[in-house]
Image (cartoon, rainbow, N blue to C red):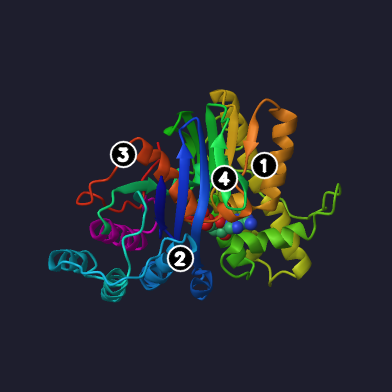
Amino acid sequence: MKILAIETSCDETAIAVVDATGDEKAAQFRVLGNALLSQVEIHKEYGGVFPALAKREHAKNLVPLLEAALEEAELLREDTQAISQETHDAITKLLEREPTLDEQLLAFLAETETPEIDAIAVTAGPGLEPALWVGINFAKALALAWQKPIVAVNHMEGHVLAALARGEGDALEIKDVAMPVLALLISGGHTELVLMKEWLAYELLGQTRDDAVGEAYDKVARMLGLPYPGGPEVSRLSESLRTPDVGCPTPYILPRPMLHDGTCDFSFAGLKTAVLYLLKDRDGLSDDEKAQLAYEFENAVADVLWKKTSRALLDSGARTLVIGGGVSANTHIRRVFTEKIASEHPGVELRIPSAALTTDNAIMIALSGFYRALRKEFADPAALSASGTRSLA
Ligand code: KG4
Ligand code: ZN
């Protein structure tokens, strides 16, 4: 089954074509085409993702990325096509708020044949609603023009599946997954522990009561005068102090919020505020002090994430642990989880996404699209809408 997947939930515009075979027990995926544009440089100026700008950039980039992904997949056939007036009008209506996208898409459709794909998968949430809508309306327009079914994908399910996938280069597979699966999803908007008891059925075990962990990273980075996105910057500073086997002596002590409260919930606002207080009476920090503070911040984050995850593993009896979302790229978190799983939960298999699949991309949307299409869970285009808070559980 060939899936064309579209991701526009945040600040990455991505389109992938993935050929999938197999079933829920064992599936193989070949990435035929993968085109992605990050808007990070554009949003840097604003110190965070600016929704109206994200939406405009998605609209500008979707057709060029579609062309690139189909071309790489060798599914682009140029030929003059007659689009019926009815289809033309329906597409223009769908894209009435994005006149440039409408124009680009109609021109593209008029000179290319319908590609040999089986379904279109699109992120329906969670994410920034204006950004999601661009991708959704684009998917609807393609579905209409090409007469293909649409699958509405939950972005967080994409992160879970990307973490479960293994392989190299363009060949991925998802198999031998010991159930249940516990997923720690950590990104700019989410911090949650979700249990997949049965394949693609979720139960929420815990979540943040205030800030997401990526948000805490980004805010602390800003306080330290580091650019957006803050996660990689804080990590770089902190890692500069992590010589093998030698714990860095740091004068700073930050709280580990809710560490011993007996729940699987998180809180990161207090940690951020503690950093703010530390900086309040100071006239800026030296580079060494910034690194020491970043180091202690990362230790506090990793302590809390591990403790809560460990509790959820015990409570749920999960046999596989996955970490997904942008923050799962973090070197220290990966290191702590890899060491702790081996020493404290040796019977649990840890799966972490490859670097390319960690940050937002369309391949992960295609993985989810495949399983949902196998179950014939197609969306009614008329009813398909964006949901910023679309939850997994
Ligand atoms: O999943 P993602 O790409 O977008 C969503 O929020 O959905 O996650 C972005 C978040 C940002 O807060 C960013 O600072 C954080 O992931 N991040 C990191 C690292 N790379 C990205 N946080 C810590 N360490 C990193 N290496
Ligand atoms: Zn994400």
Q: Residue drawn 35% across and 49% down?
A: 118
Mark 1: which amino acid?
Asp
Q: Nearer the viewer, residue 343 or 135?
A: 135
Residue 165 spot, x, y in % from top left: 56, 42
Secondary structure state at the residue bearing disc 4: strand
- Chief secondary structure of the magenta portion: helix
Foreground label between 3 and 1: 3
The amino acid pointed to by label 2 is Glu
Task: Determine the residue positioned at 34% across, 49% down.
Answer: 119
Q: What residue is shown at x 52% (from left), y 41% (from top)?
A: 28
- Spatial distance from mark 3 to mark 1, Cα to Cα? 39 Å
Instruction: State left or right for residue 159 relative to residue 152.
Output: right
Q: Is residue 373 magenta?
A: no
Residue hosting label 3: 377
Residue 172 is marked as: 4
Mark number displayed over residue 137: none
Mark 3: amino acid: Glu
- Residue placed furthest toward the left: 86
* Corner quadrant of residue 393: top left
